[in-house]
Image: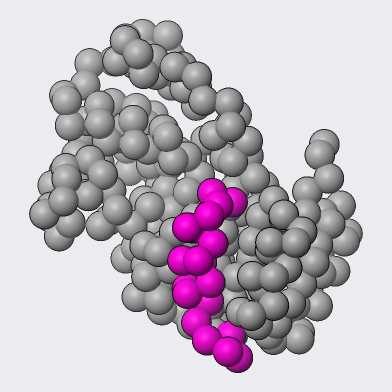
Amino acid sequence: MKNYLIQIIEDDPSVKKLLEITFKEYGFNHISCENKKNAMMMFLSHNPDLLIVDLGLPDGDGKEFIKQVREISKIPVVVLSARHDEKEIIAALDVGADDYITKPFSVNELLARIRANLRRNISDENISSKILCGELEMDVASRDIFFKNEQLKLTPIEYELLKYFLLNTNKTLTHKQILKEVWGVGYQSEMQYLRTYVNTLRKKIEQNSTRPNYIKTESGIGYRFCCNN
Ligand code: CA
């Protein structure tokens, strides 16, 4: 396994310590800082593989840092927030964060999220016309989709929705982001469209659409398309 470097931006000493101990124990290299100003310098000089960003920093909002990073990099960004506040999380995802963890968090959850986001970034680097996820296979060039080796019949919107999910696996996507990408600008508040199509898609690709394995609901925030291969 590659030796990943994680950059932590967190001003709370106890949380920072917990992150550092966890990363050390599980074999991730890490560097850390406590404020926005140092975060950018450190990011530019060390070229890390993933960022963990606290939203409430002493010299400003972590979201501003994420915004700056997004102008120059596609690095996975996981937000860490004491504020169990959907609005804050949604705003962070909307400026380009990939995922979030709310404090207090479990070590297992933290590691699972980090692995998923590192994995997603690697698969982004090898973009081919075929996307594989569990028992799903999409050929982007021919627009064919197979589920358990059988061709899946999808409506054009279902296809676009599934394609967007497959290109953004293991990432929390807000309702607004999905509506904008699949339906277009101007549809960002049409929640009912999204709910309807997620339901019809679930019926086609989930063993049990009330307990989905692929399209997970992130309550109050959006959806996450889970892919573990
Ligand atoms: Ca803080």
For residue 53, which quarter of the picture? bottom right
In the image, residue 117 above or below residue 53: above
Which residue is at a point 81% across and 78% down the rendered structure image? 17
Residue 200 rendering spot, x and y as whole percentages: 20, 34
Which residue is at a point 17% across and 25% down the rendered structure image? 156
In the picture, measured across the screen, residue 26 lies left or right of residue 199, that is: right
- Is residue 67 one of those drawn in magenta? yes
Quadrant in which the C terminus is drawn: top right
Residue 143 rendering spot, x and y as whole percentages: 29, 15
How many callouts does the rendering have? 0
For residue 189, which quarter of the picture? bottom left
In the image, residue 4 above or below residue 35: above
In the image, residue 14 above or below residue 151: below
The answer to which of 203 and 121 lies nearer the viewer is 121
Residue 142 rendering spot, x and y as whole percentages: 31, 10
Instruction: Please report the bounds of the magenta region as a residue range.
Output: 57-75
- Is residue 113 one of those drawn in magenta? no
Which residue is at a point 34% across and 75% down the rendered structure image? 87
Quadrant in which the N terminus is drawn: top right
In the image, residue 140 above or below residue 17: above
Residue 188 rendering spot, x and y as whole percentages: 17, 56
The answer to which of 142 and 27 lies nearer the viewer is 142
